[in-house]
Image (cartoon, grey):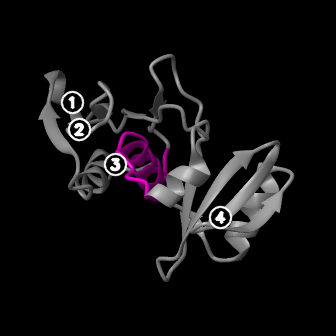
Amino acid sequence: MLTFNEKLAIIESFPELERKNVSLGRLNFQFPNSISDKKNIVYHLHPNGNGFVYAGKSGDYETDEKGLVNIRDFSADQLRKLLQSAIEGLSLIEKTASEEAIIGDSSEERWIDGENNQLILINENESWNIYYGLNLDASFDTYGEAEAFLQEEGFSRK
């Protein structure tokens, strides 16, 4: 388990977040550029190491009714990944006209490799399709197959 100071250092490494002191030595961190009314990303980080991070609708975490995940036992990597996911989920992603034509109303995931190549994963017509720009790169029957392929190719979720 990370200490309060270790968690605080990780959270403060995200310049998008603003620290807000609350009662009993607890801290909140807000994302002022949120596209929703939801501004608190970190809620009640306590000196004992307990606290919550907003996971929203990512589906990757078990959340309470407010979309919060308890981070008491998170590792440094888990905490960074959750914070990045929360920020991205509340950020406005500007899509190009071609991306908008492909994505439409579907939800997408963006994946990136070490050379900043970006792929878009979309669930369309009961298939998981991977696009590079306007080009369909690969198609899979399940999300797990698409995810495994992307990871094997050196991509990680953005």
Which residue carries the number 1 mark? 26
Distance from label 1 to label 2 (Cα)? 10 Å
Please tell me whether mark 3 sits on a helix, a strand or a loop: loop
Task: Give amino acid for label 1.
Answer: Arg
Are the residues at dot 4 and dot 3 in contact (C-beta closer than 8 Å)? no
Residue 51 appears at what percent x and percent y?
36, 33
Are the residues at dot 4 and dot 2 in contact (C-beta closer than 8 Å)? no
Q: Nearer the viewer, residue 116 or 93?
A: 93
Query: For mark 4, does the 10 Å Cα neighbourhood hold few (<14), some (14 to 19), or many (20 or more) residues?
Result: some
Please tell me whether mark 4 sits on a helix, a strand or a loop: strand
Which residue carries the number 2 mark? 29
Instruction: Give the residues drawn in magenta, as a range.
Output: 74-96
**Do we see residue 29 in this rendering?**
yes
Query: For mark 1, does the 10 Å Cα neighbourhood hold few (<14), some (14 to 19), or many (20 or more) residues?
Result: some
Disc number lying in front (4 or 2):
4
Distance from label 1 to label 3 (Cα)? 14 Å
Distance from label 4 to label 3 (Cα)? 41 Å
Residue 60 appears at what percent x and percent y?
61, 41
Which residue carries the number 3 mark? 3
Task: Give amino acid for label 2.
Answer: Phe
Seen in the picture, residue 17 relative to 63 is either above or below; the reply is below
Q: Which of marks 3 and 2 is nearer the N terminus?
A: 3
Q: What label sits on residue 92 in the rendered view?
A: none
Look at the image and say whether residue 87 sits in the magenta stretch. yes
Which residue carries the number 4 mark? 131
Task: Give amino acid for label 4.
Answer: Tyr
